[in-house]
Image (spheres, grey):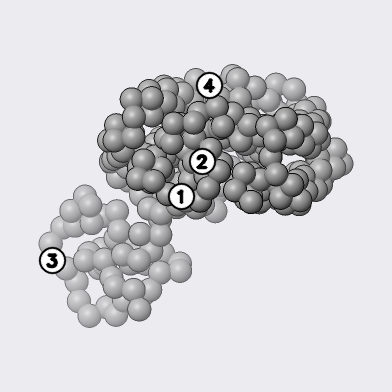
Amino acid sequence: MPTACACWATAPCRPGCARLPRAGRSSSRPTASCRVTSRCTRTCCVVDLLRLVRTNNLLLAAAGVLAGGWIALGTLQVPTVLVLAAVSAVGFGMAGYVLNDIWDRAADQVNRPGGERPLAAGRVTRGTADLCVAGGVLVGLAAAALVSGTAVLVGLGALAVLVPYSPLLKRRGALGNVAVAMLAGLPLMYGAIAVGRAAAGIVPWTLAAWIHLVREIVKDIDDQAGDRALGRRTLPLVLGPRRARAVAAVLAAAFVPLSLALPAEAHYHGAYFLIALFAQLVVLAVASRLFTGRTQGNSRLLKGAMLVGIVALVAGRVA
Protein backbone atom coordinates (compact mmCIF):
# COMPACT_ATOMS: atom_id res chain seq x y z
CA MET A 1 0.00 0.00 0.00
CA PRO A 2 1.56 3.35 -1.04
CA THR A 3 2.31 5.82 1.73
CA ALA A 4 0.50 9.13 1.82
CA CYS A 5 1.72 12.64 1.19
CA ALA A 6 2.29 14.51 4.45
CA CYS A 7 -0.35 17.10 3.58
CA TRP A 8 -2.98 14.64 2.39
CA ALA A 9 -5.75 16.55 4.08
CA THR A 10 -5.40 19.66 1.89
CA ALA A 11 -7.08 18.16 -1.20
CA PRO A 12 -8.75 14.97 -2.43
CA CYS A 13 -6.75 12.25 -4.11
CA ARG A 14 -6.87 12.16 -7.88
CA PRO A 15 -8.19 9.01 -9.61
CA GLY A 16 -5.82 6.09 -9.41
CA CYS A 17 -4.17 7.14 -6.14
CA ALA A 18 -4.76 5.49 -2.81
CA ARG A 19 -7.47 7.22 -0.74
CA LEU A 20 -6.64 7.93 2.90
CA PRO A 21 -8.89 7.66 5.94
CA ARG A 22 -10.23 11.06 6.98
CA ALA A 23 -9.03 10.83 10.57
CA GLY A 24 -8.45 14.54 10.97
CA ARG A 25 -7.37 17.81 9.42
CA SER A 26 -3.95 19.36 9.42
CA SER A 27 -3.88 22.74 11.13
CA SER A 28 -0.76 23.92 9.30
CA ARG A 29 -0.66 25.46 5.85
CA PRO A 30 1.00 23.19 3.25
CA THR A 31 4.40 24.21 1.96
CA ALA A 32 5.08 24.79 -1.74
CA SER A 33 6.73 21.41 -2.13
CA CYS A 34 3.86 19.74 -0.31
CA ARG A 35 1.25 21.36 -2.55
CA VAL A 36 2.84 19.52 -5.47
CA THR A 37 1.78 16.24 -3.93
CA SER A 38 -1.36 17.34 -2.14
CA ARG A 39 -3.66 15.39 -4.44
CA CYS A 40 -1.86 12.08 -4.48
CA THR A 41 0.29 9.59 -2.67
CA ARG A 42 4.06 9.76 -2.82
CA THR A 43 4.05 6.71 -5.06
CA CYS A 44 1.83 8.45 -7.61
CA CYS A 45 4.03 11.56 -7.56
CA VAL A 46 7.17 9.51 -8.15
CA VAL A 47 5.42 8.01 -11.16
CA ASP A 48 4.69 11.53 -12.45
CA LEU A 49 8.35 12.50 -12.11
CA LEU A 50 9.40 9.36 -13.95
CA ARG A 51 6.96 10.25 -16.71
CA LEU A 52 8.24 13.82 -16.80
CA VAL A 53 11.83 12.76 -17.48
CA ARG A 54 10.73 9.99 -19.92
CA THR A 55 12.37 7.14 -18.02
CA ASN A 56 11.79 4.63 -20.80
CA ASN A 57 13.47 6.90 -23.34
CA LEU A 58 16.38 7.54 -20.97
CA LEU A 59 16.94 3.80 -20.59
CA LEU A 60 16.86 3.52 -24.37
CA ALA A 61 19.44 6.32 -24.65
CA ALA A 62 21.73 4.57 -22.15
CA ALA A 63 21.32 1.31 -24.07
CA GLY A 64 22.14 3.18 -27.27
CA VAL A 65 25.42 4.45 -25.79
CA LEU A 66 26.38 0.96 -24.64
CA ALA A 67 25.43 -0.44 -28.04
CA GLY A 68 27.51 2.21 -29.79
CA GLY A 69 30.52 1.26 -27.70
CA TRP A 70 30.01 -2.45 -28.34
CA ILE A 71 29.66 -1.86 -32.08
CA ALA A 72 32.88 0.16 -32.10
CA LEU A 73 34.81 -2.35 -29.96
CA GLY A 74 33.40 -5.45 -31.62
CA THR A 75 32.90 -7.00 -28.20
CA LEU A 76 30.47 -6.77 -25.27
CA GLN A 77 33.03 -5.30 -22.87
CA VAL A 78 31.83 -2.47 -20.62
CA PRO A 79 34.77 -0.17 -19.84
CA THR A 80 34.30 2.58 -17.28
CA VAL A 81 34.30 5.33 -19.90
CA LEU A 82 31.36 3.66 -21.63
CA VAL A 83 29.33 3.57 -18.41
CA LEU A 84 30.14 7.24 -17.77
CA ALA A 85 29.07 8.11 -21.31
CA ALA A 86 25.76 6.32 -20.72
CA VAL A 87 25.24 8.32 -17.50
CA SER A 88 26.08 11.50 -19.39
CA ALA A 89 23.53 10.69 -22.10
CA VAL A 90 20.86 10.07 -19.46
CA GLY A 91 21.61 13.46 -17.88
CA PHE A 92 21.46 15.36 -21.15
CA GLY A 93 18.38 13.42 -22.22
CA MET A 94 16.56 14.22 -18.98
CA ALA A 95 17.33 17.92 -19.39
CA GLY A 96 16.15 17.87 -22.99
CA TYR A 97 12.87 16.05 -22.37
CA VAL A 98 11.87 18.22 -19.42
CA LEU A 99 12.90 21.42 -21.20
CA ASN A 100 10.73 20.36 -24.12
CA ASP A 101 7.78 19.84 -21.76
CA ILE A 102 8.32 23.30 -20.25
CA TRP A 103 8.12 24.95 -23.66
CA ASP A 104 5.32 22.66 -24.87
CA ARG A 105 3.10 23.02 -21.81
CA ALA A 106 0.31 24.84 -23.65
CA ALA A 107 0.46 22.53 -26.68
CA ASP A 108 0.37 19.42 -24.48
CA GLN A 109 -2.81 20.65 -22.83
CA VAL A 110 -4.39 20.51 -26.30
CA ASN A 111 -2.68 17.46 -27.80
CA ARG A 112 -2.75 15.32 -24.64
CA PRO A 113 -5.81 16.37 -22.61
CA GLY A 114 -5.83 13.06 -20.76
CA GLY A 115 -2.97 14.17 -18.52
CA GLU A 116 -0.21 12.17 -20.20
CA ARG A 117 2.22 15.02 -19.54
CA PRO A 118 2.46 15.66 -15.76
CA LEU A 119 3.69 19.25 -16.14
CA ALA A 120 0.86 20.25 -18.48
CA ALA A 121 -1.64 18.50 -16.19
CA GLY A 122 -0.39 20.46 -13.17
CA ARG A 123 0.78 17.40 -11.24
CA VAL A 124 4.40 18.61 -11.32
CA THR A 125 5.37 22.24 -10.70
CA ARG A 126 7.50 24.42 -12.96
CA GLY A 127 10.08 24.69 -10.18
CA THR A 128 10.46 20.92 -10.02
CA ALA A 129 10.83 20.82 -13.80
CA ASP A 130 13.53 23.51 -13.69
CA LEU A 131 15.44 21.50 -11.08
CA CYS A 132 15.28 18.44 -13.33
CA VAL A 133 16.72 20.44 -16.23
CA ALA A 134 19.56 21.88 -14.13
CA GLY A 135 20.33 18.51 -12.55
CA GLY A 136 20.35 16.79 -15.92
CA VAL A 137 22.79 19.31 -17.40
CA LEU A 138 25.13 19.03 -14.41
CA VAL A 139 25.11 15.22 -14.48
CA GLY A 140 25.59 15.19 -18.24
CA LEU A 141 28.55 17.56 -18.24
CA ALA A 142 30.21 16.05 -15.16
CA ALA A 143 30.06 12.52 -16.54
CA ALA A 144 31.20 13.70 -19.98
CA ALA A 145 34.20 15.44 -18.40
CA LEU A 146 35.26 12.09 -16.95
CA VAL A 147 35.10 10.50 -20.40
CA SER A 148 37.04 12.92 -22.60
CA GLY A 149 37.23 16.46 -23.89
CA THR A 150 35.55 15.32 -27.09
CA ALA A 151 32.61 13.97 -25.10
CA VAL A 152 32.23 17.35 -23.38
CA LEU A 153 32.24 19.15 -26.73
CA VAL A 154 29.63 16.76 -28.12
CA GLY A 155 27.51 17.28 -25.01
CA LEU A 156 27.75 21.05 -25.29
CA GLY A 157 26.83 20.79 -28.96
CA ALA A 158 23.78 18.73 -28.06
CA LEU A 159 22.74 21.34 -25.49
CA ALA A 160 23.17 24.07 -28.11
CA VAL A 161 20.49 22.31 -30.15
CA LEU A 162 18.27 21.22 -27.25
CA VAL A 163 17.83 24.68 -25.73
CA PRO A 164 16.45 26.47 -28.84
CA TYR A 165 14.65 23.41 -30.22
CA SER A 166 11.13 23.96 -28.89
CA PRO A 167 10.98 27.79 -29.02
CA LEU A 168 12.80 28.16 -32.37
CA LEU A 169 13.72 25.05 -34.35
CA LYS A 170 10.41 23.26 -33.81
CA ARG A 171 8.69 26.18 -35.53
CA ARG A 172 10.82 25.66 -38.65
CA GLY A 173 9.27 22.44 -39.89
CA ALA A 174 11.79 20.11 -41.53
CA LEU A 175 14.77 21.86 -39.90
CA GLY A 176 13.46 21.05 -36.45
CA ASN A 177 12.72 17.45 -37.45
CA VAL A 178 16.26 16.96 -38.77
CA ALA A 179 17.81 18.55 -35.67
CA VAL A 180 15.95 16.35 -33.19
CA ALA A 181 16.52 13.25 -35.34
CA MET A 182 20.28 13.80 -35.29
CA LEU A 183 20.16 14.26 -31.52
CA ALA A 184 18.02 11.17 -31.02
CA GLY A 185 20.49 9.03 -32.95
CA LEU A 186 23.50 10.53 -31.19
CA PRO A 187 23.79 7.98 -28.31
CA LEU A 188 25.17 5.37 -30.72
CA MET A 189 27.86 7.78 -31.90
CA TYR A 190 28.46 8.93 -28.31
CA GLY A 191 29.28 5.38 -27.28
CA ALA A 192 31.74 5.03 -30.15
CA ILE A 193 33.36 8.34 -29.20
CA ALA A 194 33.66 7.22 -25.58
CA VAL A 195 35.79 4.20 -26.54
CA GLY A 196 37.91 6.24 -28.94
CA ARG A 197 36.51 4.86 -32.22
CA ALA A 198 34.22 7.57 -33.52
CA ALA A 199 34.34 6.39 -37.15
CA ALA A 200 32.60 3.14 -36.17
CA GLY A 201 29.61 5.14 -34.97
CA ILE A 202 28.83 6.81 -38.31
CA VAL A 203 26.70 3.99 -39.78
CA PRO A 204 24.64 3.40 -36.59
CA TRP A 205 24.12 7.15 -36.13
CA THR A 206 23.00 7.61 -39.73
CA LEU A 207 20.48 4.77 -39.58
CA ALA A 208 19.14 5.79 -36.17
CA ALA A 209 18.78 9.44 -37.20
CA TRP A 210 16.98 8.44 -40.40
CA ILE A 211 14.34 6.37 -38.67
CA HIS A 212 13.97 9.03 -35.97
CA LEU A 213 13.32 11.60 -38.70
CA VAL A 214 10.39 9.52 -39.94
CA ARG A 215 9.09 9.21 -36.39
CA GLU A 216 9.32 12.96 -35.75
CA ILE A 217 7.20 13.70 -38.82
CA VAL A 218 4.69 11.07 -37.72
CA LYS A 219 4.50 12.67 -34.26
CA ASP A 220 3.99 16.11 -35.80
CA ILE A 221 1.06 14.74 -37.80
CA ASP A 222 -0.52 13.61 -34.53
CA ASP A 223 0.21 16.93 -32.79
CA GLN A 224 -1.22 19.34 -35.36
CA ALA A 225 -3.90 20.82 -33.09
CA GLY A 226 -1.51 21.96 -30.37
CA ASP A 227 1.17 23.10 -32.82
CA ARG A 228 -1.38 25.17 -34.73
CA ALA A 229 -2.51 26.81 -31.49
CA LEU A 230 1.08 27.90 -30.78
CA GLY A 231 1.67 29.17 -34.31
CA ARG A 232 4.29 26.57 -35.19
CA ARG A 233 5.10 25.80 -38.81
CA THR A 234 5.63 22.06 -38.60
CA LEU A 235 5.76 20.00 -41.77
CA PRO A 236 2.10 18.83 -41.60
CA LEU A 237 0.93 22.41 -41.08
CA VAL A 238 3.07 23.74 -43.94
CA LEU A 239 2.48 20.97 -46.48
CA GLY A 240 -0.79 19.62 -45.17
CA PRO A 241 -1.24 16.26 -43.43
CA ARG A 242 -1.61 14.30 -46.67
CA ARG A 243 1.68 15.51 -48.16
CA ALA A 244 3.43 15.16 -44.80
CA ARG A 245 2.30 11.54 -44.64
CA ALA A 246 3.67 11.02 -48.15
CA VAL A 247 7.05 12.50 -47.17
CA ALA A 248 7.24 10.28 -44.09
CA ALA A 249 6.22 7.23 -46.13
CA VAL A 250 8.89 7.86 -48.77
CA LEU A 251 11.56 8.33 -46.10
CA ALA A 252 10.42 5.14 -44.36
CA ALA A 253 10.56 3.16 -47.61
CA ALA A 254 14.01 4.60 -48.42
CA PHE A 255 15.28 3.45 -45.03
CA VAL A 256 15.17 -0.21 -46.09
CA PRO A 257 17.76 -0.08 -48.92
CA LEU A 258 19.83 2.33 -46.83
CA SER A 259 19.84 -0.10 -43.90
CA LEU A 260 21.13 -2.79 -46.26
CA ALA A 261 23.73 -0.79 -48.18
CA LEU A 262 25.52 1.04 -45.35
CA PRO A 263 26.12 -2.01 -43.10
CA ALA A 264 27.19 -4.05 -46.14
CA GLU A 265 29.73 -1.37 -47.04
CA ALA A 266 30.96 -1.37 -43.42
CA HIS A 267 31.32 -5.19 -43.52
CA TYR A 268 28.74 -6.06 -40.87
CA HIS A 269 28.28 -9.78 -40.23
CA GLY A 270 25.33 -11.82 -41.48
CA ALA A 271 23.62 -11.70 -38.08
CA TYR A 272 22.84 -8.04 -38.68
CA PHE A 273 20.96 -8.68 -41.90
CA LEU A 274 18.97 -11.54 -40.40
CA ILE A 275 17.80 -9.58 -37.34
CA ALA A 276 17.39 -6.29 -39.20
CA LEU A 277 14.90 -7.96 -41.52
CA PHE A 278 12.26 -7.80 -38.77
CA ALA A 279 12.82 -4.07 -38.27
CA GLN A 280 12.74 -3.46 -42.01
CA LEU A 281 9.40 -5.24 -42.35
CA VAL A 282 7.94 -3.06 -39.58
CA VAL A 283 9.22 0.10 -41.27
CA LEU A 284 7.72 -1.00 -44.59
CA ALA A 285 4.43 -1.66 -42.82
CA VAL A 286 4.51 1.87 -41.41
CA ALA A 287 5.21 3.26 -44.90
CA SER A 288 2.19 1.38 -46.21
CA ARG A 289 0.00 2.65 -43.36
CA LEU A 290 1.09 6.23 -44.04
CA PHE A 291 0.33 5.94 -47.75
CA THR A 292 -3.17 4.73 -46.90
CA GLY A 293 -3.79 7.49 -44.34
CA ARG A 294 -3.50 5.44 -41.15
CA THR A 295 -1.50 7.44 -38.59
CA GLN A 296 -2.43 5.95 -35.21
CA GLY A 297 0.20 3.68 -33.66
CA ASN A 298 2.93 4.37 -36.21
CA SER A 299 5.16 6.11 -33.69
CA ARG A 300 5.17 3.05 -31.41
CA LEU A 301 5.85 0.72 -34.32
CA LEU A 302 8.86 2.79 -35.34
CA LYS A 303 10.14 2.82 -31.77
CA GLY A 304 9.96 -0.96 -31.71
CA ALA A 305 11.80 -1.10 -35.03
CA MET A 306 14.55 1.06 -33.51
CA LEU A 307 15.05 -1.38 -30.65
CA VAL A 308 15.30 -4.33 -33.03
CA GLY A 309 17.66 -2.31 -35.21
CA ILE A 310 20.01 -1.62 -32.30
CA VAL A 311 20.13 -5.33 -31.48
CA ALA A 312 20.86 -6.07 -35.13
CA LEU A 313 23.70 -3.54 -35.28
CA VAL A 314 25.34 -4.99 -32.18
CA ALA A 315 24.93 -8.56 -33.41
CA GLY A 316 26.44 -7.57 -36.74
CA ARG A 317 29.66 -6.52 -35.00
CA VAL A 318 30.10 -8.90 -32.10
CA ALA A 319 28.61 -12.13 -33.52
Question: Around disc 4, counting alpha carbons within 10 Å, would you say few (fewer than 14), some (14 to 19), or many (20 or more)?
Answer: many
Nearest to viewer (mark 1 / mark 3): 1
Q: Nearer the viewer, mark 4 or mark 3?
A: 4
C-alpha distance separating marks 4 and 1 = 38 Å
Q: Which mark is residue 73?
A: 2
The local secondary structure at tag 2 comes to: helix
The alpha-carbon separation of the residues under discs 1 and 3 comes to 57 Å
Q: Nearer the viewer, mark 2 or mark 4?
A: 2
* Amino acid identity at mark 4: Leu
| Element class at badge 3 | loop
* Side (left or right) of 152 relative to 114: left
Residue 164: % across, % down: 44, 22
Residue depth check, mark 4 versus mark 1: number of the one nearer the observer = 1
* Amino acid beneath label 2: Leu
On the image, the x and y values in percent for residue 13 come to: 37, 67
- Mark identifier at residue 77: 1
Q: CA distance from mark 2 to mark 3?
A: 62 Å
CB of mark 2 within 8 Å of CB of mark 4? no
Q: Amino acid at mark 3?
A: Ser
Against 264, residue 238 (above or below) is above
* Residue named by callout 3: 27
**What residue appears at the point 33 percent right and 25 percent down from the top-left corner?**
149
Write down the residue under mark 4.
169
The answer to whether the residues at label 1 and label 3 have Cβ atoms under 8 Å apart is: no
